[in-house]
Image (cartoon, helix red, strand yellow):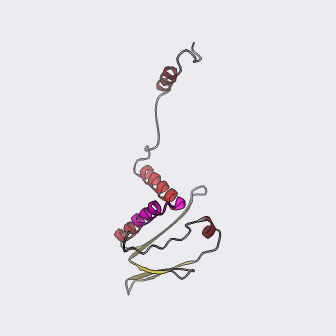
Amino acid sequence: MAGVKVSVAFADKEAMGRKLTITITVDPEAKEISVRDDSGTERSVQAVVVLGGDAERGVFYLFGYGASADAAWAYRQGLLHAMEADDPYYKNFYKQCACQIAQALDPRAFRQETDPWTVLDRWEGEDPGRGPWN
């Protein structure tokens, strides 16, 4: 990731335990997007996407502004950072994203549908002579 400025928030449990303020300023006339956090880190970017969710309650928030290609590039850079830094929080986030994308593209992606007779045949083959039928 040479030449890439990495700004990572919430990378560890200590950071997640404190209040954090992130300010996003979109100026359509100047075609500028500024992202600043309360630690003083500020970046001028071409795109921003904010996701929020609570799967248990079915609550979803999505905000996006700017060039989708730049936002997708940033997503990729985050994945590369997670792998290179061996960051467990972000590695799990990207793994969960991959699973959600796969399920959105093909809802059957993680289903293992079979009929009961196939399962019984497999079980009997794995444990001959010890099944309930003998």
- Tell whether position 39 is magenta: no
- Relative to 18, residue 82 above or below: above
Q: Please identify the dominant SS of the magenta region.
A: helix
Quadrant of the image occupied by residue 15 = bottom right
Q: Residue at x 39, y 64 (%)?
A: 76
Furthest residue toward bottom: 30
Q: Is residue 24 visible?
A: no
- Tell whether position 77 is magenta: yes
Quadrant of image for the C terminus: top right
Where is residue 109? Give x, y as percent: 43, 44
Where is residue 115? Give x, y as percent: 47, 28
Q: Residue at x 52, y 17 (%)?
A: 128
Out of 11 and 44, give the one closest to the viewer. Answer: 11
Out of 71 and 117, give the one closest to the viewer. Answer: 71
Figure disc tally:
0
Where is residue 57? Give x, y as percent: 61, 57
Specify the segment rendered in magenta: 75-89
- Relative to 124, residue 83 above or below: below
Furthest residue toward top: 134
Quadrant of image for the N terminus: bottom left
Out of 1 and 53, give the one closest to the viewer. Answer: 1
Where is residue 27? Give x, y as percent: 42, 84
Q: Is residue 114 left or right of residue 134?
A: left
Q: Is residue 128 visible?
A: yes
